[in-house]
Image (cartoon, rainbow, N blue to C red):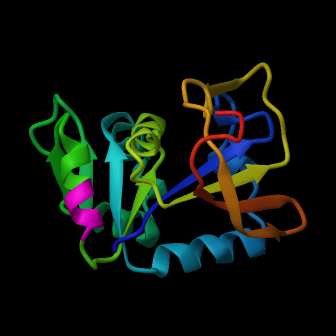
Amino acid sequence: MTEIVSEIMLSIDGAARGEKSPAYYGYTGPEFMAWLAQKSAQPNRTLIGRKTLDALSGVPEAYQDDDYRKMTKNPGWVVSSTLGSAGWPGLIVLGSGFLDTIRAERAGQDAEIRTMGSLSIVRQLLAANLLDRLRLIYCPLILPQSGVEPFFKGMLDQKFKLEDHRILDGEVVVLDYRPDGAPHYA
């Protein structure tokens, strides 16, 4: 079975993005950057939403390094009801029935499928019991004034099992969870 993984970078208070925050919330220590490079070197396919694709496509050319170009060529899908083509050569556009395609891909033995941003897609994968691993990457800051996109808002109550954890550069915490059904009270 192909594993479906969502990697979400968050502030401690659960914001998936900060209006004033730089990439990675400014945490770019050597262990963290090496961990990111190791993850991106592993074979995977991308599942991304249109808004995330738009944001990443808007990265200024001066910042489009080899890793950026590799990312744009990675195979995968963009979920959109408005796009005719993705603009990235590796992506295929999927509409509202994207869960059926992902379900079929999950049944195969291909490289893992990784979401990139796209909180709505992560929520839908969780609700459809299609997510195999939720990797939460916590940066040590809170953003009560400038934080946006609260990750857990709108999700169903759910229980998880901790599979792995690590601390990078003494400050960034990576927690790997597997969905584990309904909470005990359900």
Report the residue that reaches farthest toward the left: 84
Q: Which residues are magenta?
A: 103-107
Q: Residue furthest top?
A: 145
Residue 9 rendering spot, x and y as whole percentages: 64, 49
Q: Position of residue 173 (x, y in %)?
A: 79, 59
| Residue 140 falls within the magenta-colored stretch | no
Nearest the viewer among 20 and 8 is 8
Q: Is residue 120 left or right of residue 183?
A: left
Magenta-drawn stretch contains 104: yes
Residue 88 can be seen, yes or no: no
Which quadrant holds the C terminus? top right
Residue at 57% over, 48% down: 181
Q: Nearer the viewer, residue 56 or 156?
A: 156
Residue 150 image position (x, y, % from top left) = 63, 28
Asked whether, in this view, residue 183 is left or right of residue 98, the answer is right
Vertically, is 4 above or below 152?
below
SS majority, magenta: helix
